[in-house]
Amino acid sequence: MALTLRFYRRHLPHWEVEHARYFVTVRCADSLPREAVLRLREIADSVRATEPRSAAFAGLQREAFRTAEKYLDRGHGSCPLARHEVASVVRDELVALAEWQIDVPHFTIMPNHWHALLVPPSECPQSLSTIMKRLKGRTAKAIRHFEAGTGPVWQREWFDRWIRDDAEWLRCVAYVRNNPVKAGLAPTWQRHPWTQ
């Protein structure tokens, strides 16, 4: 059994585990229509009332993810990440996590969101929350420069999932690679310029 380092909830649950690998999704601030936001709030209310280690909890996490993905892949919102210079900002910050010895072996940057697989070192002094604040903060500052805006770039929270085993890892790799293909952005993941 993995040792839980931190577990906290905002609207979404965030579970940090010793020696863990994570699948994360970050959405642009305007990436979901009101109906999707309302449904995600309903799911979040149910999550708060559910035991974190239960099958029901995992099911609610999957439902939240599927609900968001349905709208994200349609390209809702202003889609700033569709611009080369803006997507480059996210890619460069994911690569820069190597400064903290955090491996990011797979990611995809979509027009209004991005996914990444994060592998912190065994004795990582930074929490997942700290890592995500760095990514979101540094990218938002640079993106505001390109977009000449002042409002939020990202949704306040991000989705994260602790990857429990190698089979789940392979499913996450396949998901990340297939996302731009499924959304019609490229015929294969290798042809999508923002997928690694």
Image (cartoon, helix red, strand yellow):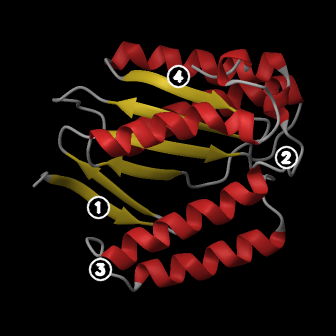
> Residue 96 location in percent, x, y?
49, 15
Q: Quadrant of the C terminus?
A: top right
Q: Quadrant of the N terminus?
A: bottom left
Q: CA distance from mark 4 to mark 1?
A: 24 Å
Q: Judging from the image, what secondary structure is the residue with disc 1 in?
A: strand
Camera-nearest residue between 150 and 99: 99
N-terminal of the two: label 2 or label 4? 2
Quarter location, residue 55? bottom left
**Which label sits in the foreground, 4 or 3?**
3
Residue underneath mark 4 = 94
Camera-nearest residue between 132 and 185: 185
- Please state which amino acid type lies under the numbered disc 2: Gly
Q: CA distance from mark 3 to mark 1?
A: 12 Å
Residue underneath mark 1 = 7
Q: Judging from the image, what secondary structure is the residue with disc 2 in?
A: loop
Above or below: residue 104 compared with residue 130: above
